[in-house]
Image (tube, rainbow, N blue to C red):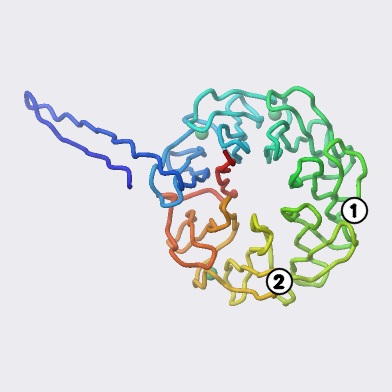
Amino acid sequence: MPMAIVIARMRAHGVGLLVAILLTPALTAAGAELAFVSMRDGDPEIYAVADDGTNLRRLTRVRSEDTRPAWSPDGTHIVFVSDRDGDQDIWVMDSQGGDQHQVIDTDAFEDMPSWSPDGKRLLFVSDRDGNWEVYTCAPDGTGLTNVTNHPGWDGDPTWGPTGETIAWVRDSDENQDVVVAQANGKDVRVVATHRAWDGDPTFSPGGTRIAFRTHRDGNIGIYLYDLARATLTNLSANDLWNEEPAWSPDSQRIAWASSPAGNREIIVMQMASRQQTNITQSPHNEWAPRWSPDGSMIAFISDRTGEMRLYVANADGSNVREVSGGPVRDVPCSWRPQPRR
Ligand SMILES: [Ca+2]
Ligand SMILES: [Ca+2]
Ligand SMILES: [Ca+2]
Ligand SMILES: [Ca+2]
């Protein structure tokens, strides 16, 4: 049921009085939610909305950059980046925007936070030692671990499905490789190294494979690396620019952004048949695909209205709807996980 906003304009003693009565909708069991970033009030703030565009609400209200939201696995908290105390740090709030508190406070830049699958660690990047490294800490900021310890740039970190492994991108002499290690930084392993840029790593839901973007063939392809067999497969198998692979929760499909006709589209590949389907087919740009936790929907950004907005479609491309209710920033949305009860 859409949120009903009843505005009654009342006049008393010649003075206009605006009374807004907010009727809170009943929470539906199947409702999924997303968090995203918008500058519609003048500076970056974090918003949340249901997958049908209802129940839109602003979670931060600070004249600072509030960005990079990521839900906790139990859906109760959001980790995010804010520079409200003068520089970028890691903050946590509850899922309604309450109890906003700093968990990492340094004079350096912190960015790209995410929650471990078991909810016990945070993953983020920081340049506090003079170059970018990947760190983990407890959700209260204690127990800091430098995972990378490498003199070049290390970034774009992502958790493996059990939280025991992490993948990230390592730059050495302007060669970028995907690297996998244990979450404590041990057993560092470079995935299919090649003197070209690799990036956008994403683990398969079972943790045995990694999909990533690679420039090794002159275009930008999506490749698949099997960690046990050490085999490499060209998934996109075309001459286009393909980026931002995202694995479906059931591991049967991978979505990514590609440009088959000069503008970007969301492609979904069936892993078994390798069939690729363009699910957006618009003359504008679509990118940043993110699967809903149940795998039935894909969220993406599109500029089809002339500004960037957030959209949700069924995984086959049907039932496209704009959900952000206004412009968004070009950072990925985060779906609220739906933990089993
Ligand atoms: Ca703000
Ligand atoms: Ca900082
Ligand atoms: Ca480094
Ligand atoms: Ca398009």
In this image, 186 relative to 256: left or right?
right
Residue closer to the observer: 338 or 313: 338
Q: CA distance from mark 1 to mark 2?
A: 27 Å
Residue 145 horizontal/vertical position (percent): 83, 30
Give coordinates of residue 19: x percent, y percent.
Answer: 21, 31
Amino acid type shown at disc 1? Val
Q: Residues within 10 Å of mark 2 (few under 14, many from 20)?
A: few
Disc sitting over residue 250 in the figure: none
Q: Residue at x 46, y 64 (%)?
A: 304
* Mark 1 / mark 2, whichever is N-terminal: 1
Q: What x and y, as percent, mark residue 89?
A: 66, 30
Residue that carries the numbered disc 2 in the rendered image: 272
Residue at image location 52% in from the left, 69% down from the top: 280
- In the image, is 324 to the left or to the right of 178? left
How many marks the image carries: the answer is: 2
Residue 190 numbered tag:
1
